[in-house]
Amino acid sequence: MRMILAGCLLAGAAVASEPVIGPDGFGKLRIGMSERQAARALGVPLLVGGEGRNADCYHVQPARGPVALAIMLQKNRVVRVSNYGDEGPMRSDHGIRIGDSEAVVLRAYATPPQRSLHAYGDGVHDVYLTWWRKDGRGVRYEITGGKVTAMHGGSDAIELVEGCS
């Protein structure tokens, strides 16, 4: 029995050490960092998204690592980290993963979320669930068909729907 419990504790510790998406960023990648600092924090070069490097707002992705991780920068500062559909090990700071049900998300938080209709949803069931901290940072889950399809952590930029707008 002791050996089984020890194994469970070690497995839990391994999961807990994986970077998570939350209001402050993704692992060592923190909201407010410059692009250069973000690359250093992740330990890999960052590739600029299709819209190019715009002084006001643009996206980058790690050259290696989580393929669905997107980083939004405004005025060369990280303002949002997102997981767009990677059902792998990437989790939120509350243990939520892509593919989890809306019910799982709701149970994970002590306070109810702000609930709003998804911009491209069915007008009823497809929603955004957003939690805010007092400092203006938060986490937003996109729910489509009752399942988490994307998650975002960071500043008020988590509410931007179409890229930087």
Image (tube, rainbow, N blue to C red):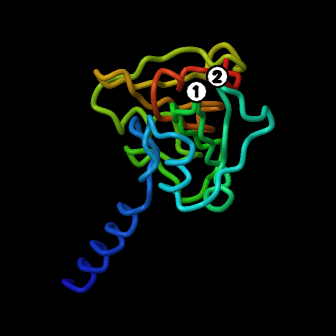
Q: Position of residue 146 (x, y in %)?
A: 59, 33
Q: How many marks?
A: 2
- In the rendering, which numbered label is found on residue 9? none
Q: Position of residue 21 (x, y in %)?
A: 46, 44
Q: Quarter of the image for the N terminus: give it.
A: bottom left
Q: Is residue 93 above or below residue 88?
A: above
Residue at 36% x, 72% y is 11
Q: Position of residue 145 (x, y in %)?
A: 65, 32
SS for callout 2 = loop
Residue at 19% x, 83% y is 2
**Pick the front one: 95 or 79:** 79
Disc 2 to disc 1, how far (Cα)? 5 Å
Mark 2, residue position: 56
Q: Is residue 7 above or below residue 23?
A: below
SS for callout 1 = strand
Amino acid type at image mark 1: Gln
Residue at 68% x, 31% y is 58
Q: Is residue 49 above or below residue 143?
A: below
Mark 1, residue position: 74
Q: Position of residue 56 (x, y in %)?
A: 64, 22
Residue at 63% x, 15% y is 124
**Labels 2 & 1 near each other (Cβ < 8 A):** yes
Q: Is residue 94 above or below residue 17?
A: above
